[in-house]
Every structure is written in C-alpha cells, then in structure tokens.
Image (spheres, rainbow, N blue to C red):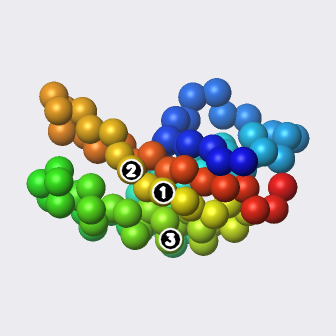
Amino acid sequence: MNYTVAPNLTNLSFNETNTLASILQNIAIILATPKGTVPMARDFGVEMDFLDLPIPMAEMMMVAPVREAVEHWEPRAKVLEVTSKRDSVSGKLTPIVKVEIVNE
C-alpha cells in the first residue's frame, strides 16, 4: 500500500506503538529537518542545497536529497515519488513524498 507524507509535525507521538504510524511520523520528521541542524546527529535530515534557488529549479534539485534522506533514515519505506507543494505568496516549497512500506 502507498502513503503520501508531508513534513507535518503536529500531533507527534514520542512513544508511538503503531508501526505504520511510527514510520509515517519518522518520514515527516525527516522531511522537516534540514541536514546539519540536529546536535549529535549532524547527518540527519535533508540536504538543503536547493534553498534560495528559483522555485522551478528548486523543485527539480530537491528530489534526490529528499529521496536519499528518507530511504537512508527510514529503511522500512521505499520512495516512489517526490513532488512538492508551492506557496506562491511566501515562496515556500514543501516536499511531498509517496512511499511504499517495505517492512512493517
């Protein structure tokens, strides 16, 4: 089964017992975390080299780092597709990933 995940950090559960919910929450956290911002785990998160690029270019340049981060930090998920949501007013680009859970 496929799931779509965005970097939504509302309603986090720090003791999630449901495996599927835990995997999806982990992916949301990965997507919301710029690489280099977690003390003692500087490799965690998504490389943000695409920041400050024009939106069409940033959309293309974010696919590989998002895919690599999710598949590295949450090996129970296989990334099927990386898309984005644009906010034309703020210029914010939000990564959206479609994943398949490979090991629940």
Residue furthest right as drawn: 17
Q: Residue 31: percent from the left, percent from the top?
A: 49, 51
Residue at figure coordinates x 78%, y 45% from the top left: 20
Mark 3: amino acid: Glu
Which amino acid type is marked by label 1? Glu
Residue closest to the eye, 49 or 61: 61
Res. 32 mark:
none
Q: CA distance from mark 3 to mark 2?
A: 14 Å
Residue at the image position 24 percent from the left and 33 percent from the top: 87
> Mark 2 falls on what kind of element?
strand
Mark 1, other Cα within 10 Å: few <14 / some 14–19 / many ≥20: few
User: Horizontal and vertical percent for residue 23?
Assistant: 72, 50
Instruction: Give the residue number, with chain letter if any, for mark 3.
Output: 68
Q: Amino acid at mark 2?
A: Thr
Residues at marks 1 and 2, CA–CA distance in whole angstroms: 7 Å
Position of residue 65 in the picture relative to residue 19 (left or right): left
Helix, strand or loop status at disc 3: helix
Which is more N-terminal, label 3 or label 1?
3
Q: Residues within 10 Å of mark 2 (few under 14, many from 20)?
A: some
Q: Are marks 1 and 2 in contact (CB under 8 Å)?
A: yes
Residue at mark 2? 83
**Location of residue 65 (image quadrant):** bottom left
Give the numbered dot on residue 81.
Answer: 1
Q: How far apart are labels 1 and 3 at the CA level?
A: 12 Å
